Image (tube, helix red, strand yellow):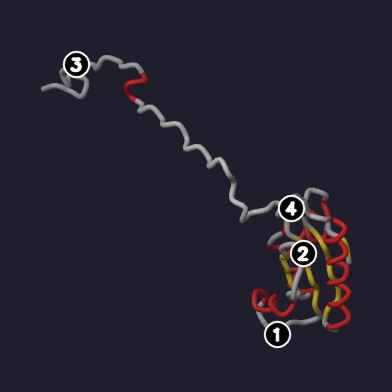
Amino acid sequence: MTGPVGGNIMEPRERLPISTLVPKRKPPVSAPERSSNSVRIRRADPAAIRKAVLDYAQRLRQDRPEVLSVRWFGSWVGGTASVGSDVDLCILVRRASRRRRDRIVGYLPESFPVGLDLFVFTPRELEQLRTQHPSFALAIDGGIEV
């Protein structure tokens, strides 16, 4: 009986060069010569984003009496933001009648210059977060009050 290399199954097989065992890769498909014009990468304007955050926080305090504080944290505050970075805001409210994930919708602005991640907590929930997810709570605590 012969094995895949032509020797007896009971005899040790001869070693084949690796090039005969591993199929050669095909070169990658080259990108089209002309790029699509549907995606445009723009430089984010830090001054415009800062103004949007401050204006939004001010509107929240004026229109929503339950808001105790607004804390801006994440890459924009830490100086590591890049194209595509979103704004992370933690809104502390006196009390909430809806579940956390359901209450966020009520706080979303009509428009914002970049993506926006909102986290709406009561003081009790924020304290629980410090125990259950200390690294996330630390990120929020490392932010700035706006």
Q: Residue 113 carries which label?
A: 2
The residues bearing labels 4 and 2 have C-alpha atoms spaced at a distance of 12 Å
**Which type of secondary structure does the marked residue at label 4 adopt?**
loop
Residue at left 79%, top 61%? 140
The residues bearing labels 3 and 4 have C-alpha atoms spaced at a distance of 65 Å
- Find disc 4 in the rendering and name its residue: 42
The three-letter code of the residue at mark 4 reads Arg
- Find disc 3 in the rendering and name its residue: 11
**Which type of secondary structure does the marked residue at label 3 adopt?**
loop
Residue furthest toward the left?
Answer: 1
In this picture, residue 32 sits left or right of residue 113:
left
**Which type of secondary structure does the marked residue at label 2 adopt?**
loop
In this picture, residue 132 sits left or right of residue 44:
left
Q: Which comes before the other along the chain, label 4 or label 2?
A: 4
The three-letter code of the residue at mark 1 reads Ser
Q: Which comes before the other along the chain, label 3 or label 4?
A: 3
- Find disc 1 in the rendering and name its residue: 97
Residue at left 10%, top 22%? 1
